[in-house]
Amino acid sequence: MGGFGRARRAVLAGAAALALVLAPASPPAAAADAPALLVVGDSISAAWGLPPGSGWTDLLQSRLKERGHRERVVNASISGDTTSGGRSRLPGLLAAHKPAIVVIELGGNDGLRGGSLAATRENLDAMIGSARAAGAKVLVIGMKLPPNYGPAYTRQFDALFADAAKAGGAALVPFFFAGFGEDRDYFQPDGLHPTEAAQPKLLDNVWPQLVRLLARR
């Protein structure tokens, strides 16, 4: 029995050593402590229809690391989400992640559904206010609608984002698709969702305003 016990202990020790080798490395303490950059968006930021890891938020994380920023990107975007959905989810996200910066990329689905623009504005105002009250800097990303929604509705929709950002003291990207929104080559067959090739352009449209918030921290 003594020999069997010694052999069993040797096998267990070897298994434990192998487990240590094969186990994934724990993230560095600095990464766990890094300030969160929270993105609350819809299918555009959720990278709908694209390979995992290819969306603009993934490219953002790489750029932050390359340029010496400590922030970790928390992408809480959900395909099909609206400002109403984002507003209801935001308090929990703020409590869980305590972000230093919040990027709000919502409103496109509100407009595509012909929803109440007053309600969309109220939701944006509430989200900006909640994020700022939690101590976060805020960046609002604007969107535009196709002209078939009518000139009055599209004008009011376009103005929502700038007006909400100004009123709430948030930074603004006026149009997420600036520079390529008219080029169908950068969109998937549905004509709504950007392709993988468009993701660096989305990041480049966001980066100038985002880097200012990073500097202000």
Image (tube, rainbow, N blue to C red):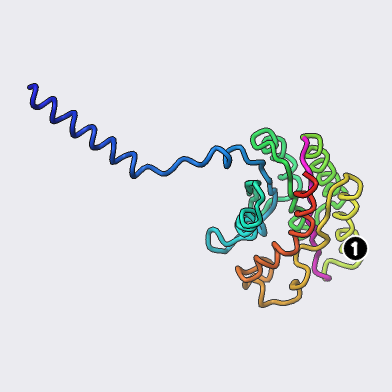
* Relative image position of residue 126 (x, y in whole percent): 82, 40
Tell me what residue is drawn at x 85 percent, y 54 percent.
Answer: 161
Which element carries disc 1, helix, strand or loop? helix
Residue 18: quarter of image: top left
> In the picture provided, is 159 more to the left or to the right than 80?
right
Relative to 68, is 166 on the left or the right? right
Q: Nearer the viewer, residue 47 or 57?
A: 57
Between 165 and 126, the residue placed more toward the observer is 165
At label 1, which amino acid type do we have?
Arg
Q: Is residue 87 above or below residue 209?
A: above
Give the magenta part as a residue range: 135-147
Name the quadrant of the N terminus.
Answer: top left
Q: Which residue is at a point 87% across and 67% down the rendered structure image?
A: 150
In x, y percent, where is residue 17?
28, 37
Residue 53 in the image: above or below residue 180: above
Name the residue at 76% across, 58% down.
Answer: 108
Observer-nearest of 203 and 79: 203
Residue that badge 1 annotates: 155
Q: Quadrant of the C terminus?
A: top right
Q: In the rendered view, does 165 fall on the left or right side of 189?
A: right
Quadrant of residue 184 in the image?
Answer: bottom right
Most distant residue in the front direction: 68
- Asked whether, in this view, residue 40 is left or right of residue 27, the answer is right
Q: How many numbered marks, from 0 up?
A: 1
* 3 in the magenta segment: no
x, y percent for residue 110: 77, 54
Is residue 145 part of the magenta span, yes or no? yes
Residue in view at x 65 percent, y 65 percent: 199
Q: Give the crowd class for mark 1: few <14, some 14-19, many >=20 residues within 10 Å.
A: some
Residue 180 in percent (x, y) is at 74, 73
